[in-house]
Amino acid sequence: VGCVVFSKIDLDREWLKERKMAMVSVSNSFLTLNSPNQLRITRRRLSAMASSTTGVRVAEGQGNLPKLVLTCPHKSEAEIYLFGGCITSWKVASGKDLLFVRPDAVFNKIKPISGGIPHCFPQFGPGEIQQHGFGRNMDWSVVDSENADDSAAVTLELKDGPYSRAMWDFGFQALYKVILGADSLSTELKITNTDDKSFSFSTALHTYFRASVTGASVRGLKGCKTLNKDPDPKNPIEGKEDRDAVTFPGFVDCVYLDAPNELQFDNGLGDKVIIKNTNWSDAVLWNPHIQMEACYRDFVCVENAKLGDVKLEPGQSWTATQLLSIS
């Protein structure tokens, strides 16, 4: 499918059919999801990118859901679904996709997308509202896009609405900036309290990495306090990690409190990923083993998390970053 090229003219209230796949650089403009089949441009000035290899492309994804495709001249690529604000693919220059989407994932907006980097917000795990909150079950919108010579970036936004208010009655704004580099993928999540009362939340990036489960390992967690949810997730066992390299010999569901801001992940397939973060205070390792017989051998989850409640007063914000890079 070819690119749709725009000259620098006013396109206020013009409709883009998401099935047309537009390659654009958004300059002082905002893309807002109004329906599964439409993206509306509510500001002006689109610059053409027909000949560029760096940028953001709007495309039709699985289940006819709109997705964004970020590309770089070094042949790296990332895909982000607006439903759930979920990054589902990160391909490096070799063409290998380092993220994993489960074969049972559905793209019907009834269930969250199972794989990639789903959001857990405003709750991690079970609790007063639905499992892992509602951030992964809502449509995010595009509010900014940036292109440089060797990177492409997009910022998504999620705000409260009737769906979120029905279970968590607070006003909020979540901004999620994703930057694709030649050999890196970085994210910045900023949560702002837009309500007139304080609220508390927990959150995580539930990252699924493609892996050979028998060869995968994570380094950097030695000495951390652990909450091991095996065998009983409701009554985790406190402990301390004493291994230099944590492996996945069976069912793994373990929380690491006050984890370091850098981990080294070996996917067992020949790739080593450095995971750096700021303000994600905890980490979670997960592999369901035979509970997911069809796919457990092919992935592990290494998650950055903020499991203790973050309390925000009206107008206050909390920000955390994650940087994935090939070593």
Image: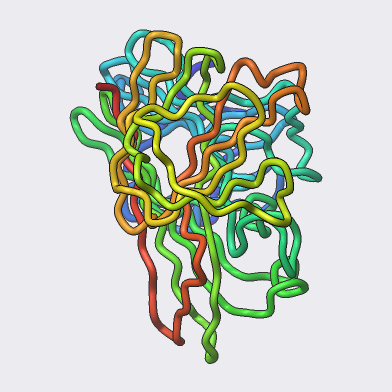
Q: In this view, does 283 lie to the left or right of 264?
A: right
| Residue drawn at point x = 77 percent, y = 43 percent | 111
Which residue is depicted at the point 29% across and 23% down?
A: 326
* Observer-nearest of 183 and 265: 265
Q: Establish if 205 lies above or below 252.
A: below
Q: Which of 312 and 110 is in front in this view?
A: 312
221 sits to left or right of 302: left
Q: Quadrant of the N terminus?
A: top right
- Place residue 149 in its image quadrant: top left
Q: Which residue is drawn at 69% across and 25% down?
A: 289
Please determine whether, in this image, residue 139 is positioned above or below residue 214: below
Residue 194 image point, x, y percent: 49, 80
- In the image, taking residue 252 as reference, residue 318 lies left or right, namely left
Q: Which of 215 and 147 is in front in this view?
A: 215
Instruction: From the viewer's side, name the closer residue of 111 and 126.
Output: 126
Residue 249, given in percent of the width and then of the height, sits at 58, 21
Q: Indicate whether 44 appears above or below 166.
A: above
User: In the visual, does 198 lie left or right of 27?
Assistant: right
* Total numbered labels: 0
Residue 275: name its quadrant: top left
Displayed quadrant of residue 56: top left
Residue 229 lies, in percent from the top left, at: 65, 46
- The residue at the point 33 percent across, 40 percent down is 186
Query: Residue 300: x, y in percent?
Result: 55, 27
Q: Residue furthest left?
A: 149
On the rendered image, what quadrant is the C terminus found in?
top left
The colour scheme of the drawn protein is rainbow
Mark yes or no: residue 15 visible. no
Q: Can residue 294 be seen in this view?
A: yes
163 to 45, vertically: above or below: below
